[in-house]
Amino acid sequence: MDTALSKALVVFSERGYHGASLAELRAAMKLATGSLYKAFADKRAIFLATLDHYIARRDRQLRERVDAQHSGRDKLEALLQFYAESASDSEGRRGCLVVTSATELATLDAEAAAKVRAALRRVETLLRDLIRLGQADGSIRAELDAEIVAGALFCVIQGLRVVGKTGRAKREMTSVAKQAAALFA
């Protein structure tokens, strides 16, 4: 099912929830109509399963990147680079399903909105925790307000994902991430 959900992810990321048709999803997922409806009640169910799949995959990828670093500062810089890379080239043009969902469905679907809020909250909390870790290990200035800097970096990350939809190059996006890292230098 992971493969089918990954295919649905491409459709939803490129076309949005409202722009994606069941026929497109079925074709992309390579499922017969009967199999599709056996696994999912409707397009909304496919979307929610795809959103869960995307969030879990991205959380795992981010965690692996961050955990490979040692200091709080290095972990924070790895997080910023992860998002800059995700916001560039073809992946950036495809977009982030969480960001797309926040703007497309937040007021229309309470369950999707709750999933999006939880995913965004986890990222902002991780930012704050990494700043505090860096302050504790001396790699980030202690006088910085971790909440405020986390909020600023969170907005930069989300901005990267939105701007990435315009097809920015990796070099450009990673330069933005490096500049954002200067906020806590």
Image (cartoon, rainbow, N blue to C red):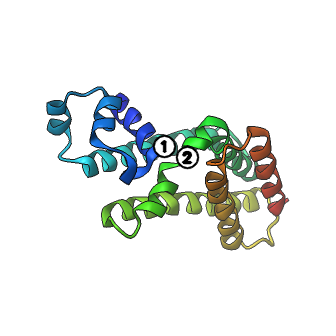
- Badge 2 element: loop
Tally the numbered discs.
2
Tell me the crowding category of disc 1: few under 14, some 14 to 19, or many 20 or more residues within 10 angstroms, Cα based.
Answer: some
Q: Is residue 105 above or below residue 79?
A: below
Residue type marked 2: Gly
Q: Residue at x 78, y 57 (%)?
A: 180
Q: Quadrant of the C terminus?
A: bottom right
Q: Is residue 42 above or below residue 37?
A: below
- Sequence-wise, the earlier of marks 2 and 1 is 1
The answer to the question of whether label 2 and label 1 lie on touching residues, with beta carbons closer than 8 A, is yes
Dot 1 falls on a residue whose secondary structure is helix
The x, y position of residue 109, in whole percent, is 32, 64
Residue 95, label in figure: 2
The amino acid sitting under disc 1 is Glu
- The x, y position of residue 1, in whole percent, is 30, 31
Direction from residue 48 to residue 183 in the image, left or right: right
Disc 1 designates what residue? 14
Are there few (<14), some (14-19), or many (20+) residues within 10 Å of tag 2?
many
Image spot of residue 8 (x, y percent) = 37, 37
**Quarter occupied by residue 172:** top right
How far apart are the two marked residues, 2 and 1, measured between alpha carbons?
7 Å
In the figure, 125 relative to 38: above or below? below
